[in-house]
Amino acid sequence: MPENTAILLLGSNIQPRGNIQKCIRLLEDKVQIVDVSSVWKTKAVGSEGPDFLNAALKINTPLLREELKSKVLSEVENQLGRKRTEDKYAPRTIDVDIIIFNKKILDENFWKCVFIALPASELEP
């Protein structure tokens, strides 16, 4: 099965250090983690909520992008107590997004958002 490479962005502002570490441990059982960025502290965007910690992971997986999101990332978010609400800026235990898949940048805000660009640029300079 062909390998796909992805850069994932992890973010948390509810017990962020512990939740990011737990997320990485859960992902290790489901994908091959190639590299991990530093953890970056950033202000919450769009709300007065607590600061976020963000990190990026470079992974290899045989899964297609949609399968990775639905079968792995959403499951990990749920395991860590992610609650989805109408408020897209609400505090969260963990948020895991695919920002690059097979060298293609998926998030149009990639270079505009420091919380995305800094961790990801450590793994894909």
Image (cartoon, helix red, strand yellow):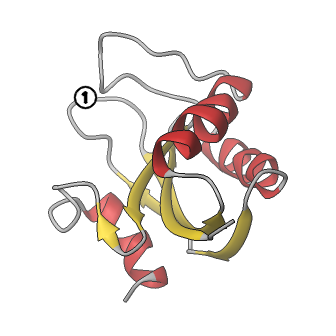
Secondary structure found at label 1: loop
- Quick check: 31 above or below 74? below
- Quick check: 82 above or below 9? above
Give the amino acid type for the residue marked by disc 1 in the picture: Ser
- Choose top left, top right, bottom left or bottom right for residue 39: bottom right
Q: Residues within 10 Å of mark 1 (few under 14, many from 20)?
A: few
- Please identify the quadrant where the N terminus is shown: bottom right
Seen at 37% across and 80% down, the residue is 121
- Please identify the quadrant where the C terminus is shown: bottom left
Q: Left or right? Give the position of 106 relative to 73.
A: left
Location of residue 8 in the rendering, given as x and y in whole percent from the top left corner: 50, 58
Seen at 68% across and 77% down, the residue is 34
Q: Nearer the viewer, residue 103 or 11?
A: 103
Q: Nearer the viewer, residue 34 or 56?
A: 34
Q: Left or right? Give the position of 108 relative to 87.
A: left
Seen at 80% across and 57% down, the residue is 28
- Choose top left, top right, bottom left or bottom right for residue 77: top right
